[in-house]
Amino acid sequence: MAAFDYDLFVIGAGSGGVRAARIAAAHGAKVAIAEEYRIGGTCVIRGCVPKKLLVYASRFASEFEEAAGFGWTLPGKPVFDWRTLIANKDREIARLESIYKANLERAGVTVLKTRATLDGPHEIRLDSENRVVTAAHILIATGGTVNLDPALPGMQHAITSNEAFHLDRLPKSIVVCGGGYIAVEFASIFHGLGVDTTLIYRGEKILRGFDEDMRDGLTEALTRHGVKVITGTVLTAIETQPAGLQLALESGASIKTDQVMFAIGRSPNTAGLGLEKAGVLTGTKGQIGVDAFSKTNVAHIYAVGDVTDRVNLTPIAIREGHAFADTVFGNKPAKVDHTMIPTAVFTSPEIGTVGLSEASARAGGQPIDIYKANFRPMKSTLSGATDRMIMKLVVDQATQKVLGVHVLGPDAGEIIQMAAIALKLGATKADFDATVALHPSAAEELVTMREKWIPPV
Ligand code: FAD
């Protein structure tokens, strides 16, 4: 006789929660999942997917310009319509959401459209249904929330990535605050769509944690394209004016703009979740502490994805959710390997990266060899585009293992996905050299770099 309503209750139907629920159900568990907003979570509804659609849209302007070098003449000046883009994007997101929901239901998962919070170690309160259900196991997969700066006067006039996907109209000018990948991606998107764009970051250089050559190369490219990149300062006030917003900067400068967007990081979404009622412990950022199997300090409560603040990316949340379900319901204990994770920054030009940056490899103390290439992509020879492509290998001197690959330029993300397989297999520089080049391509440079880079003295 079942002592609980469910074998598993999942809070949050995002990347991690959906995968965990489906796999656990496939293992025979009786599963329910609660979602307070939309099925699919951040990635599908207001993260990776809609962002990439906007990235595609933002790249057409330069492609129209480049077409002339290849003999194309456009009948007139291309015209962009923001509302069409957003309507088409919304239609696609709704389609994906319905697929996610159907997949859950087909797997036998009960989908509950409500906010859910913990009401005890095995009790879950369903807000919109005003009832409490019980479960033998609970998975917390509530993701993250955008950080704001509540002390900043006028903060209420700023938007975040959540609102950026639903603006009624494209602003004429925007200031994006932040230096992480979401901030630079949105700056690049808005700029590509013809918005006068400024990026303001309090640190010295954008994209902390990325390889220095990528950080410098992207800053240089964005600046050359016309994005104003201002570092080493923050906003001190946002004021409304009859014709937009007036921003005051710590540096003393002021900027008039149509819109201001904050992308200053995200935090684990644990506020008000009732964790204390179940005895689940959190860390200083509110993240749920878990072991290698995603188990919290309470034996039957697990957490996966951004709420644990390990590596905040969709494929990781999915893997953690899958590994949890296999471990607890599939009798197949599984841990997620959080190393060698490929990742991209979908700016124009884009960055793809896997493994160690030069700085982190050097910080590890091991002697390394660096190989670098900096060249004009073939397409630019006729298009006249000024962008450079930068490629870099970080190689362990003793073992000759390739520790990191970094690419800035067209299709960098696609290139890095493949390079990641080689690194996962422990490829050496000799393996890269032994791989036949695919010609003519940009990626062939990764297997034809022969000269070690000598740092300037
Ligand atoms: P989420 O997908 O955030 O899902 C959590 C879900 O829980 C949400 O649907 C939320 O509504 C729901 N929820 C929260 N609390 C409750 C509650 N109490 N009751 C019921 N439901 C609740 N990652 C990449 O890999 N590549 C990218 O290019 C990329 N781009 C991004 C761009 C943006 C703008 C953003 C914001 C994120 C991006 N990410 C990207 C990160 C990615 O979206 C997250 O890492 C991923 O969604 C984490 O999955 P998750 O399951 O942990 O949480």
Image (tube, helix red, strand yellow):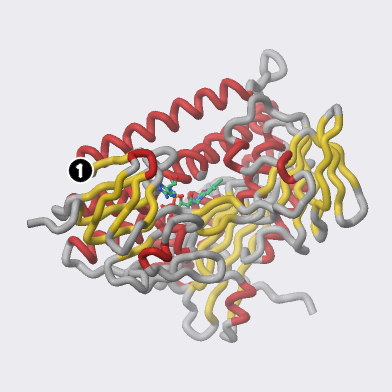
Residue in the picture at 63% in, 34% down: 58
Q: Residue furthest front?
A: 130
Crowdedness near tag 1: few (<14), some (14–19) or many (≥20) residues, C-alpha within 10 Å: some
> Which residue is the site of mark 1?
107
Q: From the viewer's perspective, is 131 left or right of 55?
A: left
Q: State which quadrant residue 278 falls in.
A: bottom left
* Helix, strand or loop status at disc 1: loop
Q: Residue furthest right?
A: 252
Depicted 223 relative to depicted 98: above or below = below
In front here: 84 or 385? 84
Q: Position of residue 430 (x, y in %)?
A: 46, 73
Residue 426 quadrant: bottom left
Q: In the rendered view, tell whether residue 60 sits above or below residue 409.
A: above
Q: Is residue 431 visible?
A: no
> In the picture provided, is 149 more to the left or to the right than 314?
right
Q: Is the residue marked 1 within 8 Å of ligand 1, measured from its CB?
A: no
Residue shown at the point (37%, 62%) measured from the top left? 303
The residue most toward the left is: 1
Nearest the camera: 306 or 275? 275
**Amino acid bearing label 1:** Ala
* Whether residue 431 is situated above or below residue 406 in the rendered picture: below
Residue 191 location in percent, x, y?
Answer: 71, 37
Q: Position of residue 105 (x, y in %)?
A: 23, 38
Nearer to me, 349 or 230: 230
* Position of residue 370 measured from the top left corner of the image (x, y, whole percent): 61, 73
Q: Residue at x 74, y 33 (%)?
A: 195
* Residue at 67% over, 18% down: 74
Q: Is residue 390 left or right of residue 251?
A: left
